[in-house]
Image (cartoon, helix red, strand yellow):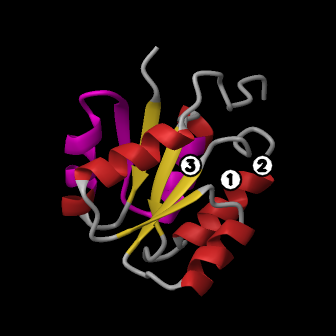
């Protein structure tokens, strides 16, 4: 079964780039706001979420916190994707439950490696609730 990845970024070109890199090997779904990402994650139960931190409305860190607080989505790995390359922000994101942190700009290979290191063949999603 092909893993499903949710990409959440308010910039369409970034979503398109990530989708192009990953769609050969994974099923990719997209959200352009934090609120949309939260709703899609709860509904679609992706195997991985790749999310920008800086989005209008609900930011990626808030979405990550809410996903990790919900037993139905808590085990979904979340990769934060951001232009903010400060160690303090990385630690803050990890403390809120982020499983990884990729900074822009990134190469296709860096993205693929980050994705493959966080996907597990055993389902991490609780589909009972």
User: Contact, CB < 8 Å: mark 2 with mark 1?
Assistant: yes
Q: For mark 3, what is the residue?
A: 39
Q: Nearer the viewer, residue 51 or 34?
A: 51
Q: Secondary structure at mark 3?
A: helix
Picture quadrant where residue 43 is located: top right
Dot 3 or dot 2: first in sequence order is 3
User: Contact, CB < 8 Å: mark 1 with mark 3?
Assistant: no
The magenta segment is: 15-41
Q: Left or right of 109: which side holds 92? A: right
Is residue 36 within the magenta segment? yes
- State the image coordinates of residue 76 (x, y, percent, origin top left): 64, 42
Q: Secondary structure at mark 2?
A: loop
The Cα–Cα distance between marks 3 and 2, rounded to whole angstroms, is 12 Å
Q: Is residue 22 above or below residue 27?
A: below
Q: Residue at x 24, y 58 (%)?
A: 107
Q: Secondary structure at mark 1?
A: helix
């Amino acid at each position: 079964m092909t893993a499903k990845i949710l990409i959440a970024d308010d910039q369409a070109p970034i979503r398109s780039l990530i989708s192009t890199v990953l769609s050969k090997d994974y099923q990719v779904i997209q959200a352009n706001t934090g609120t949309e990402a939260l709703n899609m994650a709860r509904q679609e139960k992706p195997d991985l979420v790749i999310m920008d931190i800086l989005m209008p409305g609900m930011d990626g860190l808030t979405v990550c916190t809410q996903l990790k607080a919900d037993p139905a989505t808590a085990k979904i790995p979340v990769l934060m994707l951001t232009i903010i390359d400060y160690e303090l922000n990385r630690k803050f994101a990890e403390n809120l439950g982020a499983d990884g942190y990729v900074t822009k700009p990134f190469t296709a290979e860096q993205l693929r490696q980050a994705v493959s290191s966080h996907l597990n063949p055993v389902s991490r999603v609780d589909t009972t609730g």
